[in-house]
Amino acid sequence: MRFAATMHHPDGGDILVQYRKMFDWIAAAGYAVDQTHLHYREEYGPGFVSPSASALRLMVPIR
């Protein structure tokens, strides 16, 4: 699978805004979201508390 990915940091604001920016970038770059197997993936580091307190990787499958 191929993914568009970005890191979300607590000072980066609302996580849903970051997802919207990713979807906008995917379309602008000529890719399409591929939700055949999953809608998105998030990777959490050790000691993860919440998006407002910890960093995490946001990943959206593309084709």
Image (tube, grey):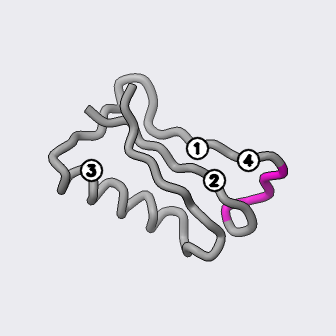
Q: Position of residue 31 (x, y in %)?
A: 21, 42
Q: Which mark is residue 45?
A: 4
Of mark 3 and mark 4, the one earlier in the sequence is: 3
Q: Amino acid at mark 4?
A: Gly
Of mark 1 and mark 3, the one earlier in the sequence is: 3
Residue 62 shown left or right of residue 1 in the figure: left
Q: Residue at x 78, y 52 (%)?
A: 48
* Label pair 2/3, CB-CB below 8 angstroms: no
* Label pair 1/2, CB-CB below 8 angstroms: yes
Q: Which residues are magenta?
A: 47-51
Q: Position of residue 16 (x, y in %)?
A: 48, 63
Q: Amino acid at mark 1?
A: Glu
Q: Secondary structure at mark 4?
A: loop
Marks 3 and 4 sit apart, C-alpha to C-alpha, by 25 Å
Marks 4 and 1 sit apart, C-alpha to C-alpha, by 10 Å
Q: Residues within 10 Å of mark 1 (few under 14, many from 20)?
A: some
Residue that mark 3 sits on:
26
Q: Residue at x 52, y 49 (%)?
A: 58
* Label pair 2/4, CB-CB below 8 angstroms: yes
Residue that mark 2 sits on:
56
Q: Secondary structure at mark 1?
A: strand
Of mark 2 and mark 3, the one earlier in the sequence is: 3
Name the front one of labels 4 and 1: 4
Q: Amino acid at mark 2?
A: Leu
Q: Is residue 63 above or below residue 37?
A: below
Q: Amino acid at mark 3?
A: Ile
Q: Which mark is residue 42?
A: 1
Marks 2 and 3 sit apart, C-alpha to C-alpha, by 19 Å
Marks 1 and 2 sit apart, C-alpha to C-alpha, by 7 Å
Report the number of discs. 4
